[in-house]
Image (tube, rainbow, N blue to C red):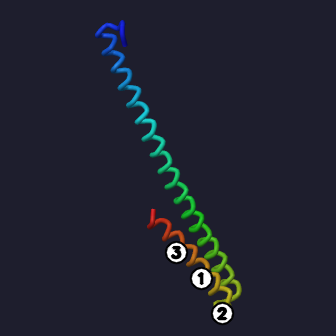
Amino acid sequence: MDGLTPLERELLGYVEQLTEASKASAQELTASGEDRRTELDGLRGSMIALLRSQLSLVATLSGWMQDGPGTAQAHSKLKDSMAHALEAQKRLVTR
């Protein structure tokens, strides 16, 4: 910094502070973006589980209405639907 005027040294100090602040800001944004990505991935998984549950439920109810209420498959399919719904609930609650 030899040969610089006091004003130039002061300005250089401000530039260094701005550079450090910019680096810190970039690190924060990167970390925040990664957190958001994790949350979105969790939400995506939950939505897939809910969709599976709904599709299973619709298939079960459709079969039940066609075959009558006494089929053993309906109970199994409803249990599958419940398992998918509980999986989605667990994912949503833990996020």
Viewport quadrant of the N terminus: top left
Query: On the picture, is 47 further left or further right than 18?
Result: right
Image position, residue 59 (x, y; %): 67, 76
Image position, residue 86 (x, y; %): 52, 75
Disc nearer the start of the sequence (2/1): 2
Disc nearer the start of the sequence (3/2): 2
Badge number at residue 70? 2
Which residue is nearer to you in this view: 2 or 43? 2
Badge number at residue 79? 1
Q: CA distance from mark 3 to mark 2?
A: 25 Å
Q: Are marks 2 and 1 in contact (CB under 8 Å)?
A: no
Per the image, label 2 sits on a secondary structure element best described as loop
Residue drawn 68% across the image and 87% down it? 73
Q: Residue furthest front?
A: 2
Viewport quadrant of the C terminus: bottom left
Which residue is nearer to you in this view: 44 or 77? 44
Badge number at residue 86? 3
Per the image, label 3 sits on a secondary structure element best described as helix
* Amino acid found under the numbered disc labelled 3: Leu
Residue drawn 57% across the image and 62% down it? 45
* Amino acid found under the numbered disc labelled 2: Gly
Residue drawn 58% across the image and 73% down it? 84
Image position, residue 63 (x, y; %): 69, 82
Per the image, label 1 sits on a secondary structure element best described as helix
Query: On the picture, is 19 further left or further right than 61?
Result: left
Which residue is nearer to you in this view: 81 or 22? 22
* Amino acid found under the numbered disc labelled 1: Lys
Badge number at residue 54? none
Quadrant location of residue 9?
top left
